[in-house]
Image: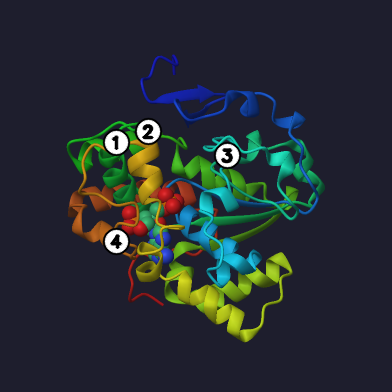
Amino acid sequence: MDNQDEYLLNFRGYNFERTLVKMNIVENMDDQEIRDDDVFIVTYPKSGTVWTQQILSLIYFEGHRNNTENIQTIDRAPFFEYNNHNMDFAKMPSPRIFSTHLPYYLVPKVFKNKKVKILYIYRNPKDVLTSYFHYSNLMVILEASNTIETFMQTFLDGRVVGSNWFDHIRGWYEHRHDFNIMFLSYEDMKKDLRGSVLKICSFLEKELSKEDVDAVVRQATFHNMKSDPRANYEDIIKKEIGTRNDQGTFLRKGTIGDWKHHLTVDQNERFDRIFNRNMKNIPLKFIWDINEE
Ligand code: A3P
């Protein structure tokens, strides 16, 4: 890439959103202060990042859980490389929670001491593609596509923020032994939110009472998050970043299998071929349909 792209900034083979990325962080990754008890939510875009931010905010902060504090999830679990609100990370109390879309090879080297906890949330890429298509058309800072065919090509070529989906997940999975990492899928969270919250708590070594787990689960459902101004990103996308129209919302459908309403049989078969070729050695489980076990 020649780095003349209007929307993308390429650094060491990976695409960041040009206007939002903090290059002083990205270029000096190993100088960033990392604490042993830091927790990182790692995702490819449109895989459930904001959902996981809400879940971790509810798990870690009593004031979030009982609704006595009105702090947005983006300030509870800020994006590391974007730091949208220019927070002073050094002033955040431990344990700090961060969100990131970074590929495995750009994170600070100190992650390899396996202290930092990494929660990698992944989603079936046909739904990622579908969600990303709508999101790109909504947001002024992303390149719009007229048709899903055009976007599918752009997505498969990795000409999007986050670069190539296969590279992202394969990179993290193949290097999983270098990190203290847990993989969890969006679909698992959707099909069994309570079980997923418990798995996350166990990984994070956080013990919550049954009532607290109930409160986390209740406030992390799609329906309740959509009306929670701390978690629905309405102000962030409309007032801070900017949308092309007033119709779209960040929490769009929140379901499994919406790709079936978008991809043609031919597009789906092409996608399957590429998926099978790229993922044949990756035993992660993918769920493509809401009724699938
Ligand atoms: P859709 O566009 O398919 O609705 P990210 O935060 O990584 O950008 O991912 C955004 C996707 O996660 C959107 O998908 C959004 O609706 C979905 N999402 C957010 N909160 C959710 C929740 N509580 N339950 C299910 N999906 C959720």
Rendering coords of residue 181 (x, y %): 68, 56
The numbered disc on residue 102 is: 3
Tell me the residue that label 2 is attached to: 157
Q: Upstream in the sequence, badge 1 or badge 4?
A: 1
Tell me the residue that label 1 is attached to: 153
For the residues labelled 2 and 1, say whether their Cβ atoms are less than 8 Å apart.
yes
Q: Which residue appears farthest toward the bottom when viewing the image?
A: 210
For the residues labelled 3 and 1, say whether their Cβ atoms are less than 8 Å apart.
no
- Structural crowding at the residue carrying mark 2, measured as other residues with C-alpha within 10 Å and reported as few (<14), some (14–19) or many (≥20): few
Rendering coords of residue 200 (x, y %): 62, 68
Tell whether circle 1 marks a residue whose Cβ is less than 8 angstroms from ligand 1: no
Q: Upstream in the sequence, badge 3 or badge 4?
A: 3
Which residue does the image show at 57% across and 37% down from the upper left? 83
Query: What amino acid is labelled 4 in the image?
Result: Lys
**Quarter containing ligand 1?**
bottom left
The numbered disc on residue 253 is: 4
Q: Upstream in the sequence, badge 3 or badge 1?
A: 3
Q: 18 and 90: which one is in front?
A: 90
Which residue does the image show at 62% across and 28% down from the upper left? 26
Tell whether circle 2 marks a residue whose Cβ is less than 8 angstroms from ligand 1: no
Rendering coords of residue 43 (x, y %): 52, 49
